[in-house]
Image (tube, grey):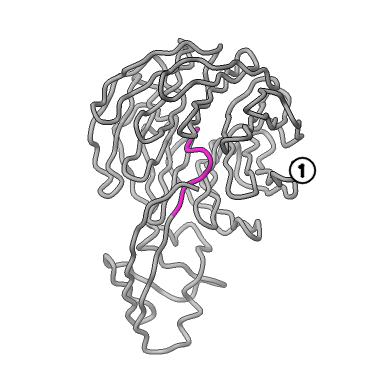
Amino acid sequence: MKNYLGRRFGRASVAIMASSALLGALALPASASDFSVSTISGLSSPNALYNDGVHLWVANSGNATVSEFDLATNALIKTISVGSQPDDIASDGTHVWVTDYNTTNLYAIDIATGVVTNTIPVGSNADGVYSDGTHVFVANSGDGTVTQVDATTGSVLATITVGSGPDEAISDGTTMWVTNGGDNTVNSVNIATGTITSTIPVGTLPDGIVQSGNYLWVANEDSNSVSKIDATTKTVIATIAVGKTPKDLTVHGNFVWVGNNGDNTVTQIDATTDAVLSTTPVGSGPTDVAADNSHVWVANGDGNSLSVFDLASTLAHTGSNTASSLVLGSLLVVGGCLALSVSRRRSRLI
């Protein structure tokens, strides 16, 4: 899953139009065709992604490797062998952390060298992993626990009992949030004491979870929905219908992006209004999503590929999509008028 506790950035555009009437045609994405989507092939059952602001890290469960990509160019930098079935991936800027579902281990990879420097036994069926920079949290779906690891020493600090079949765990430094696929709940846990402070019913088979400000977003695989939780009141305040079998999700800026494993699509949600803005076809069996100001990346587990949305070159339509468009690099031809798109990037993390 992964890429937890969201990630961010910004864009600006300058338009030279022959008629101001066409300004209304430039709006939020409304259809799948509005996104320019490319494909990176040659991976082996990519299961999880993590965007650290410089690199995109991909856990490949099919051949027990981690791929490192350059975010600016989408070029492959290196491939690192790790474990037997990498399941999830996270980073704290110094290390990349990888869970192995088969061996129940957590692996630490030194980012500078690309070498596995530590192997840490955790719980049964090590699944989701998240690092807040100080601690690493591993959801062990086989035994209903979360393992808390010191990110500097690699020592196991605590094993915390949570709900049934935990899939993902994220943290804001004080509270840990855990999705429990076995009992359709989300737990909030006081990190200092290791005690559960609330149990929140959500949809069926919750998996991916991310946080943006005071809100949590949970992908419910068997309900074909996303639950929006108020982190203060610890209640579900919205349930949003998405595609089939939503497995994981990410939030960046004002958008939530959801990978729908069952129908090979990605749903875009407005994080303020909770409205579904677009549904875009991607590769086969999307398992995870990552995003920044310029791109959305999707791991297609069954397609052995990544789908890459180029947000900077996207021209969107509203209504009946009657305005014709052609994307030529950064030059857009809209209904016979010219629009020059200029984008700039800055660093992120939710």
At mark 1, the secondary structure is strand
Q: Position of residue 283 (x, y in %)?
A: 42, 40
Q: Is residue 19 above or below residue 301?
A: below
Quick check: 45 above or below 348? above
- 220 relative to 152 in the view: left or right: right
Q: Residue drawn 29% across and 38% down? A: 69
Badge 1 amino acid = Thr
Q: Circle 1: is it few (<14), some (14-19), or many (20+) Cα within 10 Å?
A: some
Q: In which image quadrant can residue 36 be found? A: bottom left
The magenta region covers 1-8
x and y, in percent, of residue 120 in the image? 44, 13
Task: Give the residue at x 53% y 63%.
Answer: 30
Question: Could you say which quadrant of the image residue 211 lies in?
Answer: top right
66 displayed left or right of 50: left
Residue at image position (57%, 35%) is 171
Look at the magenta stretch and give its main secondary structure: loop
Q: Is residue 6 magenta?
A: yes
- Residue bearing mark 1: 235
